[in-house]
Image (cartoon, rainbow, N blue to C red):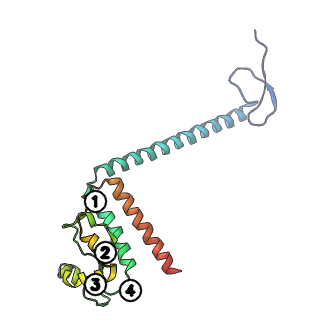
Amino acid sequence: MRKPTRRSCKICKTKFIATYDNVWWCCPEHGYEYSQRILARKKAESERKRKQEAQQERRELKIRKKALQPLSQYHKRAQTAFNAFIRQRDSGQPCISCGRNSGAKMNAGHFRTVGASPETRYDETNCHIQCEACNSYLSGNIGEYRPRLIANIGQAAYDRLMGPHEAKKWTREELDALAAHYRAKLKELKQREAA
């Protein structure tokens, strides 16, 4: 027969002789308290695991949802960020087509339209602030836009803009990066103007 083991109580740390191998407490009250600690620890561990699994599931769902979004959704987000940057960059300037600074709603108007030249869609020299009337109702008012654009960016940049461009096939990652880039530029521009 084996000699009884001397152990320290897990609650009060006093020495006692264990009657069984699985006894780690000196009295029934400490046995109950010890069991409650173990239960609380197990509960906390299971709660932590549950939260971790739920978080992982949310991440996977977000990735799956992102993969299902059409490319047009990514273009829309990138275009929104780009247009916000252009409006902030040119704020306070008059409309590039008609020269009015009416305080009306101002848009980011493309010289070469997105449909006609998707390669220059995110080119900063192709997009300037325009009043709603010129951009939406006069189809960009291109006749008045051209001379002011050349005066603004120069003949060499205008020739480059009008020249041939390689067709660009955008990926989701590139469009996400582009949107993030223009959001960062917009934030930097606003901070510079606030200072």
Q: Which residue is mark 2?
A: 156
Q: Which residue is mark 4?
A: 92
Where is residue 24? Give x, y as percent.
72, 28
Q: Residues within 10 Å of mark 2 (few under 14, many from 20)?
A: few
Gap between marks 3 and 1 measured at Cα: 33 Å
Q: Residue at x 24, y 81 (%)?
A: 146
Above or below, 51 relative to 70? above
Q: Residues within 10 Å of mark 3 (few under 14, many from 20)?
A: some
Q: Which residue is mark 1?
A: 73
Between disc 2 and disc 3, whose residue precedes?
A: 3
Where is residue 6? Give x, y as percent.
80, 23
> Which mark, by number, is residue 148?
3
Gap between marks 4 and 3 measured at Cα: 16 Å
The answer to whether marks 4 and 1 mark residues whose Cβ atoms lie closer than 8 Å is no
Between disc 4 and disc 3, whose residue precedes?
A: 4
Q: Residue at x 29, y 61 (%)?
A: 75
Gap between marks 4 and 1 measured at Cα: 30 Å
Frontmost of labels 4 and 1 is 4
Between disc 3 and disc 1, whose residue precedes?
A: 1
Gap between marks 1 and 2 measured at Cα: 34 Å
> Which mark, by number, is residue 2?
none
The amino acid type found where label 1 is placed reads: Gln
Between disc 1 and disc 2, whose residue precedes?
A: 1
Instruction: Give whichever of 188, 145 is nearer the camera.
Output: 145
Frontmost of labels 2 and 4 is 2
The amino acid type found where label 4 is placed reads: Gly
Instruction: Give whichever of 154, 190 is nearer the camera.
Output: 154
Q: Residues within 10 Å of mark 4 (few under 14, many from 20)?
A: few
